Amino acid sequence: MRFQFIASEIWIGLRRNLSMTVAVIIVAFVSLTFIGSAALLQTQVTKFKDDWYGKVEVSVLLCPTNSAKTQCASGEATEAQIKEIESVLASPEVAPEIEKVSFESKADAWKSFSKRFADQWLLSQVTEADMNASFRIKLVDPQKYQVIADVLTGKPGVEEVQDQRQILEPIFRVLNGATIVAASLAAVMLLAAVLLITTTIRLSALSRRRETGIMRLVGASNFVIRLPFMLEGAFAALIGSVLAVTGLWAAVKYLGQAAQSSSLQWVPVVTAHDVWTIAPYLIVTAVVVAMAASALTLRRFLKV
C-alpha cells in the first residue's frame, strides 16, 4: 500500500514537471558524459604510458667523424673511449638500473637508416661516415633516465644522451590537458545538474504543498514525505546516467573499430570493458547527488 502511494506520488511529480524532468535528464546526460570522457581519457593516457614506457630506450650517441660538440673535438669515438663507457655502464652504481644494453655500430646504424629512408632524398645526402655508433639502453625503471644522463653526458666520446620519453611527453601533456578540460566542463555541468534538480524538486514541492501538509497532519514521517521527491530526482538522474554510459559505449565501440581497421592498430585504445568499469561509478554518483540535492531542498518546504 505504501509502495503504491509512493509510486503514485513519483508519477504525479514527474507528470506535473515533465519539461523540467526532461531538462534534468539532458543535463545529467551531458555532465556525466563529460565525466566519463575525462575518466576514459585518463585511462587512455595510462595505457599509452604502460605500453610505450616499457619500450623506450636511452640512446648514448657516440661521436661521429665530423661532430661540432666540444667533447667530440678530437674526432670519432675511439676504442678506448668506448671501453671506458662500457665500464661505466657495468659499474655497481649504474648496472642495477639497466635491464638490457646493446651496441649499435656505424654499419648497423647505416643499415637501419637506409632501410627507413629508402627511395627518399635524405638518403642521398648522408653516408655511413655520418652515422653515430651508439649504446641502446633499456632501463629497469624508465623514469630513471637521469641516472644515465648524469654519468655519461659530456664524457669524452659521447656526443649526446637521448631519452625517447622526450618524444612521447608532449603527446602525454596534450592528453592530460584534454583530461583537465573535460573534467572542468564536467564539474560545471554537474553543478548545473544539481541546480536544475533542486529547482525541479522545489517546484514539485510547491505544487504539492497541500498534500504534504495533510500527510504531516496524519502523522507521516519526514522520510516518507521526502522519499517521493528524492526518488523523482534520482529517477531523472538515473535515466541521464544510463544514456551517458550508452553514449560512451557507442563512441568507444565505434572508435575502437575505426582504430582496428586503420593504420593505428599498434595504438592501445580504451575498450568497452573500460566503459563498463566506470559505469557503476557514474550511475551511483548521479543517483547519490540527485537524492542529496533533493533532500537538502526539501528541508525548507516541509516545514508546514
Image: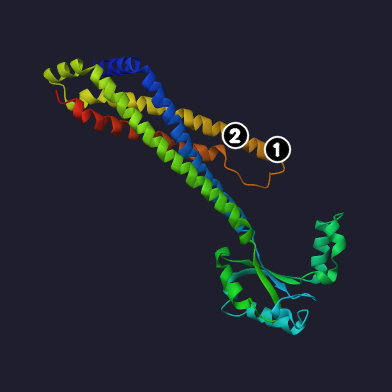
Q: Quadrant of the C terminus?
A: top left
Residue 55 rendering spot, x and y as whole percentages: 64, 59
What SS does tag 2 mark? helix
The residue indicated by pointer 1 is 261
* Horizontal relation, residue 52 to residue 225: left or right: right
Residue 154 rendering spot, x and y as whole percentages: 65, 78
Q: Nearer the viewer, residue 87 or 112?
A: 112
What residue is at 80 percent from the left and 57 percent from the top?
116
What residue is at 20 percent from the left and 30 percent from the top?
299
CA separation in Å, label 2 and label 1: 12 Å
The quadrant holding residue 102 is: bottom right
The residue indicated by pointer 2 is 253
Residue 172 rendering spot, x and y as whole percentages: 57, 53
Q: Is residue 63 above or below residue 3?
A: below
Q: Is residue 241 visible?
A: no
What residue is at 28 percent from the left and 17 percent from the top?
9
Are there few (<14), some (14-19), or many (20+) residues within 10 Å of tag 1?
few
What residue is at 52 percent from the left and 41 percent from the top?
274
Label 2 is placed on what type of residue? Lys
Q: Quadrant of the N terminus?
A: top left
Residue 148 rendering spot, x and y as whole percentages: 60, 73
Question: Counting residues from the N terminus, which is met first, the one under dot 2 or under dot 1?
Answer: 2
Q: Which mark is residue 223?
A: none
What SS does tag 1 mark? loop
Label 1 is placed on what type of residue? Ser
Q: Is residue 71 above or below residue 17?
A: below
